[in-house]
Image (cartoon, rainbow, N blue to C red):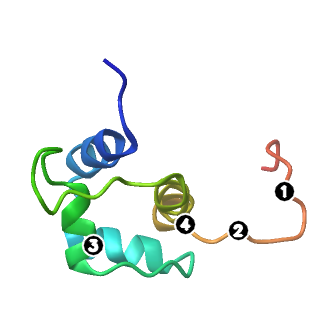
Amino acid sequence: MKMTNNDILKKLRVALQLRDDDIIKILELVDFRVTKTELGAFFRNVDHPNYKECGEQVLRNFLNGLIIYKRGPRTGGNSSINEQ
């Protein structure tokens, strides 16, 4: 069975012990706005009438925001991985 973006978002929320407010703040770090209602729709069962598929853009922005949330904003002009 293939994991969906919704499954990935759910697992990250549980693993990182994030509340809906935390996820909204993480998305705001990358200027991506989502309401609590929209977010709740991602966590519903597939057969629920208010279920909404989590698109690539939402997951991508969440992951980019999560980096900033955990590590802080990027500093300096060089984006080399080997920076110390």
How far separated are the C-alphas under marks 1 and 3?
Answer: 33 Å
| Image quarter of residue 4 | top left
Report the residue marked by disc 1. Answer: 79
Q: Distance between the Cα atoms at labels 2 and 1?
A: 8 Å
Q: Residue at x 51, y 65 (%)?
A: 65
Q: Earlier in the sequence, mark 1 or mark 4?
A: 4
Answer left or right for 24 relative to 50. right
- Residue at figure coordinates x 20%, y 54% from the top left: 17
Q: What is the spatial separation of the Cα atoms under label 2 and label 3, in whole angstroms?
A: 29 Å
Which quarter of the image is occupied by the N terminus? top left
Contact (CB < 8 A) between labels 4 and 2? yes
Q: Amino acid at mark 4?
A: Ile
Residue 35 seen from this side: yes
Of mark 4 and mark 2, the one earlier in the sequence is 4
Instruction: Kindly identify which residue carries mark 2.
Output: 74
Q: Amino acid at mark 3?
A: Glu
Q: Nearer the viewer, residue 39 or 65?
A: 39
Q: Position of residue 9 (x, y in %)?
A: 33, 49
Local SS, label 3: helix
- Residue type indicated by callout 1: Ser
Which three-letter amino acid code belongs to the residue tagged 2?
Arg
Mark 2 or mark 3: whose residue is earlier in sequence: 3
Determine whether, in the image, residue 28 is placed left or right of residue 18: right
Q: Earlier in the sequence, mark 1 or mark 3?
A: 3
Counting residues from the start of the chain, the first of labels 3 and 4 encountered is 3
Label 1 residue SS: loop
